[in-house]
Image: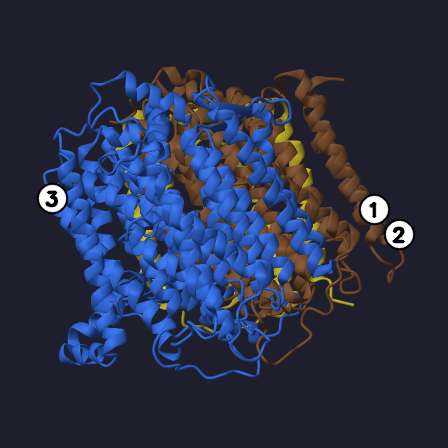
Chain colours: A brown, B yellow, C blue
Amino acid sequence: MSPNVLALLPEIILTITGVLVMVAEPVLPAGQSRKPLGVLAILGTLAAGFASWYQLGFGTIHAYFNTIQVDSFSVFFHLLIAAIVLVTLLSSLDYFEGHASHAGEYFALTLFGATGMMLMTCSVELLMVFVGLEISSISTYILAGFRKGQASATESSIKYFLLGSFATAFFLYGIALAFGSTGSTRIDVISQNLASTATPTLALLSLALIIIGIGFKVSAAPFHVWTPDVYQGAPAPVVGLMSTAPKAAAFAVLLRILFSGFPSYEPRWASLIWIIAALSMTVGNLGALLQRDVKRMLAYSSIAHAGYLLVAYTAFPADGIASACFYTAAYAAMNVGAFTVITQIGGYRENVRTIEDYSGLALKRPVLAAVLGFFLLSLIGIPFTGGFFGKFYVFSAALHAGHVWLAVIGLLNSGIACFYYLRLLASLYSRRPAIEDNLFDGITVTLPAALALTITAAATLLLGIAPNQVLSLAQRSAAATAPGSANSTTNASR
Amino acid sequence: MQLALFIIFGLLAVAGAINFLLQRHPINSALSLIVVMMSLAVLYWSLGAEFLAAAQVIVYSGAVMVLFVFVVMLLNAGEEERTHGSRAAYFAGIPGATAIFCLLSFVFLTNGKAFGSTDLINHLTHTTNNIAEISQVLFRDLLLPFEVTSVLILVAILGAVVLARKEQ
Amino acid sequence: MPADFLWLIPLLPFTGFLINGTLGRRLPRPLVAAIALIPTALSAILWISLWFSMKAPGAPESIQSVASLFGNTSWIAISGFHVDFAFSVDHLTLIMLGVVTCVGFLIHLYSVGYMAHEEGYWRFFAYLNLFMFFMLVLVLAANFLLLFVGWEGVGLASYLLIGFYFKKDSAANAGKKAFVVNRIGDFGFLLAMFLLIAHFGSLDFTTIFTAVNQHPEWQGGFLTAIALLLVVGATGKSAQIPLYVWLPDAMEGPTPVSALIHAATMVTAGIYMVARSHAIFDRSPYALGVVAIIGAATALFAACIGMVQHDIKRVLAYSTVSQLGYMFLACGVGAYTAGVFHLLTHAFFKALLFLAAGSVIHALSGEQDMRKMGGLRKRIPVTFWTMTMGVFAIAGLPPLAGFFSKDEILFRAFVSPNPIGKLLWLVGLITAGMTSFYMFRLWFKTFFGAERFEEHHDSHGHDAHGHGGVHESPLVMTLPLMVLALLSIIGGWVGVPEALGGHDEIGAFLEPVLSSTGVTVTEVVSHGTEIGLAAISVLVALTGLFAAYVLYYKKPGTAATYAQRFPALYRLVENKFYIDELYQAVIITPLLMFTRIVLGIAIDGGVVGGSAAAATATTRGLGSLVRRVQSGNIRSYAGWLALGAAAVIAVMIFGYTH
């Protein structure tokens, strides 16, 4: 197999499957269930996952004139994205049954989105990153508005689209200025040329613009304002997807850009990331305290988690990458899991919204409540869950790098966080108010959804008790992206 | 001459952009966007990027804007109603945008000398090189992004279909 | 006994949890009880065999067992350090294990009777077994991380059990409060662990303590920082000032839970942790001083509040806080052995007191207010006699358990080189008097005097026990009481000091683990002084007894008269010095206000309003898209984005480099 095909194998599989789904969609009769398309999409995702695993045996592959670099770092994120997409597809296989006529497009868009995200993680050329980012963003913009006929859904989609485009403009401008300053858009060349650039301030500016663009995608403060509205309006399975997979991809891009593109500017960007991380954690957790809507609350929680993750970036170069990778995986497992439960409880109409609506779930559906409770405990960061080791690793890495106060802020924040997670948890295990309604009567957990729940719960648990497998993979990926040129720590300050 | 061209068309672009924002009728806005695009094309050309200038005219002023105008006509969109933007938009947006503008100007002004300058006449006499270089970049170094854009467009079309189609 | 058997000790209760947690709903009650009790009993038996194998001459001082998960010997390996999934047992662990398994088993047994009429029987035992699992992990852990896993796990189990009656708001809130307050403590613990990683590259007990012992030049400095952060963790779990507020509220849980978790085991985890890491504390006189002062202050403060409480369980809760203060005080003056000794005896008599109180509550169909008790001596004789043992033991009357351990602590405080040692001793002594007073107050009010309760013949009590009338508890409940009463009598005899003709066996037993390297008792004190001090504390205890006798038995109205004479003071103490209100006003309210104002109005307020308005509009087709663009929201969001972007650029260009 030519290295060019090998390097893009997972993306090619996903694209072809996506096109197949699109082609098959009109062939199916109008009123018929779109489930077979979903199954096709699931198979495609599985195949893409295996393709990524297969790539691991080839070491580092460079392809397409060095725009693509497949290494254990990219494989780590490929596998993660494939897993998230798989779980999302499983949990939403029955989501559109009997409600929408466009389920086929949903599956296709999810696959294309995954293609974009995977391209982001394996490309070392900023323009390629940009194209991947746009593919993933546009898919998610549209997916966010998939509960058609709901005003909030369309609003969510439009908001996300407009603000997302605004942020993407910053990112693109950043790429342009990076080219202006260093004469290249390839990450490794940028890193080499930075030492001799005549315009260091311009390079700084370009980096700032890139951080703004990525900051929006990962919903880090102060670029988080869109998150609650969009998450509230979007369909629950899509929120599970878009709060994890595109973020994982964007975090991967940021890791590559900062750690292998701009390592010599570390003294500058580290303090910026420090501020963004502290701000995101604080804003996210304090904001979540005020929410009554569960999806809004989890939106703020995802802002906070973006903050925790950014803490890892300040641990340059020691444990930064490995801890960031691990946290991304742990966060993905628990958050997708939580949204899978919410998908099952709310259904397409999403009539279970507020924390009060969830009260008494444990009496009616003890297993669902227990699973959701488990994910919430992981989000709090209780030992024996992935969330705990993620936080532990990130904060110890930050402390190791000398960022004592950031670790303190982070720990304080995770203390605040338990207030609102507990509110939901306590609500699950409380008696329903006197007026009995049948909010939970329509819940049917289908086999694929049960499978999705099992996968996420098992992953969260496994990352908590036996984190070593993922840790070693994360460390291998760190070695792949480790700033080889980081040794030349030229001080970039003017 | 370059300076004169820059001043004229630079101002025109800015004026077109401001007009675009101020016009109430979508058609007027679309037309002023054409002015912006054309002025930008001239600026590209004056920098020696004549291929880009031509592409700008054909793609934006030709294809994209015509599409815009069609859509506006088809939707039969009338004069927009002005809404009161929220206060936050003014409190945060105006200082924010001003600050970004000042910061960018500051960086460009301080780094201006390091950029060097381009001699217009020189570029005008070596027109062919430019296209060769662009094709070199577009079909070799950046072949993959160029090709993958097809997926991007596919996604956009799919999205447009999903959003526009009425619920059955 | 082979080391790998160590794994069985915690895993047995865990299997109980798994079975009851998944199938318990469908199983009959006796089977649920059996599934919960048998593993606990087996753990206790394993402990006994472990005890004999370690007491045997020539037995190693500690045994260790490292588990391998998925073929990996280390649990977590990240660059620079790794943690094993390792358990180890030494003499300190052995004592803790004994307390947890034996007292735990007795309380399980008691619960069979106590919870017999509750719904959620299976859930209760599943949680209880889960608690046992985590508590055993905590004491068996060979490194700080695994200890922390147990630490958080018992917190979780405690949360579940406090909130067991989740249909009651107060119970759910108490559970939440306990959880949140403990998170504050965990924050200190986590930071301490990070510092340990940074300085030792390890979290393993042996590695760290060996390193500390090899470097006598390390004094204070980072060791003080680590020690103080550990203290923060310990104050959370062991309910010391300023984080004690959760424990009294935790009494909302079922009484056996209060006995097991909030008296005998979990709350002593902080003491255990401090004793375990004494090598670090010994190097920091400052941290030790803090521990001693916190302990003494908590002991006195909680005893004050305990004197005026009316709820029988709350009196015991404040008494627990106060006794934990004693243990802290012991650790603070370097007398870890005395602290662990008191931990041991306290586990016996406080578990007894709680269970006996539970028996009283059971008898009165859920009544907890002592003002509505009285004269129960004849009605529930077994409970009365066993509780009497507990009261005498905690009051510190010889030769019961509490006397020896408490006296040891007071003596150590008196002779400690600490400059305020004498003051600490005095505080401890006053507290001892107060302890004696409020315990006898409880005793007199509950068992003597006029019968102030109503005979319930219907079953609408708090715990909803479905019997009518006042009745003695069944044997399954009284048997644990009797065993614990016996232990409360003889439990202290393992630590009779030489001055009183004993051999201080527990001291010798703990010597290999807790031998202090830093602080040594400089003053050589004659046996005469020791006996004198013991005599003083007995006198003080008798004074407390006498005062309670006069005020609550002889002339029952007098206390109220005194209370009326100092109404402000009385109200202050009765309202627990308004500490909860203070925290609410100083910490929680401002935090919420800040959140509401800063985030609510500035960012989220406009958003929520805007969304609601927009949601009323219907949306169909492309036309609505255009309208949506005009929504004020998006503009303001874009405005925020622009402002944020400007800030980021400015920081990047002009920001300082770290």
Q: Secondary structure at mark 1?
A: helix
Q: Are marks 3 and 2 in contact (CB under 8 Å)?
A: no
Regarding residue C214, the answer to whether it shows in the image is yes
Residue A259 appears at what percent x and percent y? 44, 26
- Pointer 1 and pointer 3: residues touching (CB < 8 Å)? no
Quarter holding the C terminus of chain A? top left
As rendered, which of C560 and C609 lies closer to the eye? C560
Provide the secondary structure element on which disc 2 rests: helix
Q: Residues within 10 Å of mark 3 (few under 14, many from 20)?
A: some
Rendering coords of residue C297 (x, y %): 20, 52
Q: What residue would you read off at disc 1? A: A23
Q: Quadrant of residue B117?
A: top left
Q: Residue at x 28, y 68 (%)?
A: C581
Q: Are marks 1 and 2 on the same chain?
A: yes
**Position of C653 compared to C455: left or right?**
left
Outermost residue to the front: C501
Q: Which kind of residue does numbered mark 2 sit on?
A: Val
Residue C276, quarter of picture: top left
* A56 displayed left or right of C481: right
Of circles 3 and 2, the one toward us is 3
Disc nearest the viewer among 1 and 3: 3
Residue shown at 23%/48% (left/top)? C294
The residue nearer to you, when weighing B97 against C264, is C264
Subunit of label 2 = A
Residue A27 got which mark?
A: 2
Q: Amino acid at mark 1?
A: Val
- Inspect this view and state whether residue C237 appears: no
Tag 3 and tag 2 share a subunit = no
The residue under label 3 is: C422
Contact flag, marks 1 and 2 (Cβ < 8 Å): yes
Residue A432 x/y as whole percent = 59, 73
